[in-house]
Amino acid sequence: MIAERSGDDWTLKMNQYASQRTQSLTQLDLSGYILKKNSPSCGMERVRIYGLNGTPARQGRGLFAAVLMRRLPLLPVEEEGRLNDPRLRENFVERVFAYHRWRQLTKERRSLRALTGFHTSHKFLLLAHSDPHYRRLGWLVAEAKKSAIGAAYELYGRIFMEALAVHASARKHCNVLEQMVGYFSERLSAEERKELVELVADFLNFSGTCHDPVAIRCDADHPGSARRSAPHPNCRRRKNQSD
C-alpha cells in the first residue's frame, strides 16, 4: 500500500493494524461486516493493484479486508456499494440473521440433538439456496454420532454459511414453497388450495426480491410447519392493486 503523493509504504503498518483490529473484533460477537468499495484497505474485491508499468488491474482485495475475512471466515461480509443491489442486499441480510442463529447455537451445550434440531429448522431455507449443500449437511448430521461433536459443529457451520452464500432463485423458492404446501394443504378448501398453487406459480414471473411481504400464511401450530426458517415471498400482484 503506497501513498500516491508522498510515496510512503504503509503496507507493514496496515497489516499490523489489521491484525490487532480483527483480533479485537473477534471479541465483539459480530453477525456481519460491511466494507468500503474500492478501498485499498477495506475493499472486498476488484481493488486496483498497480503493476510496475503503472497500469492498474482490478483483481485485488484490501489489506484489512483480507485479514478480516481470513480470521473470521464464516462472518457475512459485503461491500457498501454492492448493497444497492436488492438481491445482494437481501442475501447479505439473510446470512447475517442465519449466522447470528448459528452463533447462538454454538454458545449452548453442544449435542447431536441440538445440531439435529438446528438442521431441521433450517431445512427449507437451505433448500432455497442449495440442495447439494443441504444433502451434505444432512449426511454430516447423520454421521455426527461417529465423530467428536466439536468437529461436527465446526464443519457444519462452514458448509451452512457456504450454502447460504449461494444465491436463491425463483425456481428453487417455488420448489420449497410447493413442499411447504404439503404440510397444511389438507386444512384448505379447494378454492384456497387452487389460489395457493397459483400464488406459488406466479412467483416464477415475479421480479421482486424473495422476502417481500408475506402472502402465504402458514399455520404456526401445525407440527410440520412450526419452527422452520424459510423464505416467504409475496409473489402475486393482484389486479385490484395495480388498476
Image (cartoon, rainbow, N blue to C red):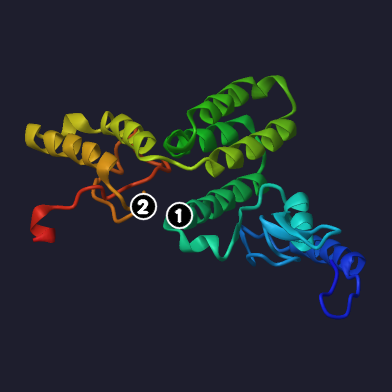
Q: Is residue 45 above or below residue 148?
A: below
Disc 2 crowd, CA 10 A, few/some/many (<14, 14-19, 20+): some
* Camera-nearest residue between 76 and 15: 15
Please, what is the three-letter code of the amino acid marked with disc 1? Glu
Picture quadrant of residue 116:
top right
Task: Please state the horizontal and vertical placement of residue 49, each as a whole percent of the image.
Answer: 77, 59
Residue beneath the point at 36% across and 49% down? 210
In the rendered image, is residue 132 in sight? yes
Task: Please state the horizontal and vertical placement of residue 229, each as a whole percent of the image.
Answer: 43, 43
Q: Is residue 68 left or right of residue 210?
A: right
Picture quadrant of residue 178:
top left
* Camera-nearest residue between 175 and 207: 207
Check disc 1 and report the residue beneath it.
90
Q: Is residue 5 left or right of residue 165?
A: right
Residue beneath the point at 82% across and 64% down? 18
Residue beneath the point at 73% across and 35% down? 150
Residue located farthest toward the bottom when viewing the structure as drawn: 6
* Camera-nearest residue between 48 and 82: 48
Residue beneath the point at 65% across and 60% down? 30
* Camera-nearest residue between 200 and 232: 200
* Residue 209: assigned label: 2
Whether label 1 touches label 2, CB < 8 Å: yes
Please, what is the three-letter code of the amino acid marked with disc 2? Thr
Total numbered labels placed on residues in the image: 2
